[in-house]
Amino acid sequence: MSLPTLLSRYRSLITAGLTEVLRGEGLLYTILRYHVGLEDEHGSASSHMGKLLRPNLVLFTAEQLGGELNQALPAALGLELIHNFSLIHDDVQDGDRTRRGRPTVWSRYGVAQAINAGDLMQALAITKALHAGKDAVKTLLEATIEMIEGQGLDLGVEEKAVGVEPYLEMIDKKTGSLIRCAFRLGAVIAAAPTEVEEALAEAGQELGRAFQIRDDLLGVWGDGAITGKPQGSDIRCKKKTLPAAIALSAVSGTDRTDLERIYNKKTLTDEDVARVIEIMDKAGVHQVGEQMVIEHLSRAREWLAQVPFSKAGMQEMEELMEYLAEREQ
């Protein structure tokens, strides 16, 4: 599935910017270049950068609202670096060994250096964002605080079963904060009216939910050859993502007993993972999740209709939302 126009137009600009920010010498900079996908495990140039959703949204929004790309770029790079700092630490906390089909930083370089690398990434992010002005930095820091609060809530979710609504409130912070921030940064750079910035933030909230729900579905039913993680990886790691929340609120009897028993085990077998997927399939969890993605994207469209994007810009946003709804990685 090819990238939509919105995620490809600014890609070379963002890649060049990240290359410049992370050009430092020493092990930590090597780790950071490896993590973002600029280099492979041997230190050779690579192009394993992921979707770059957030910085693309900053640049797109700023340009659509009349802002200058050269002013928006430092904010976009700062946001992407904050996102990557969170991923390094998230992998440590979750014990994930692979990301985008490659060993995670902590599994390759150790937990201690992963923490150091994440800390450096955060400092570089703020340093770069300063070039976009104090309002952009304030917006980025507020979103960073909210994202870290969301990560704390996520760890709490792992320890107990939660309902769908508390789970959505958690992802509004953990995932939604930085997507809302992308739209806000674009609006700040372009000096857009407050009502436009607020409409964009609401659209970002809905887009963030749709994005994370799709991610959660891929964590159970995704093709490992495409996602870079084995099918059912979130179940094997006992992550209480949306499919688990839906299932635990929908099933009863033997199915619920089995779910609770399996998620309480220290280590899960292939049979355990298969049984959980069987229960989820029986309860129609995948279909419920897909419908939620559609509903949140519909709400995002309603908010975006209040934003003065060009006709071509709205078409590109529509293409992006269709991509996010159907993506396989």
Image (spheres, grey):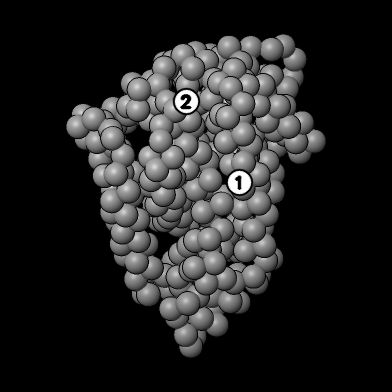
The residues bearing labels 1 and 2 have C-alpha atoms spaced at a distance of 21 Å
Q: How many marks?
A: 2
Residue 147: which disc?
A: 1
Residue 284 vertical position relative to residue 41 in the rendered view, above or below: below
Which residue has dot 2 on it?
189
Give the quadrant of residue 287: bottom left
Please report the residue visible at 56 percent of the width from the left and 29 percent of the height from the top: 136
Please report the residue visible at 42 percent of the width from the left and 17 percent of the height from the top: 69
Q: Nearer the viewer, mark 1 or mark 2?
A: 2
For residue 164, side relative to residue 199 (left or right): right
Residue 31 vertical position relative to residue 292 in the rendered view, above or below: above
User: Image quadrant for the N terminus?
Assistant: top left
Q: Nearer the viewer, residue 92 or 168?
A: 168
Query: Whole-percent x and y of residue 280?
Result: 42, 70
Please report the residue visible at 74 percent of the width from the left and 19 percent of the height from the top: 27
Q: Amino acid at mark 2?
A: Ile
Tell me if I can see residue 154 in this picture: yes
Farthest residue to the left: give it.
311
Which structural element holds mark 1? Answer: helix
Q: Amino acid at mark 1?
A: Met
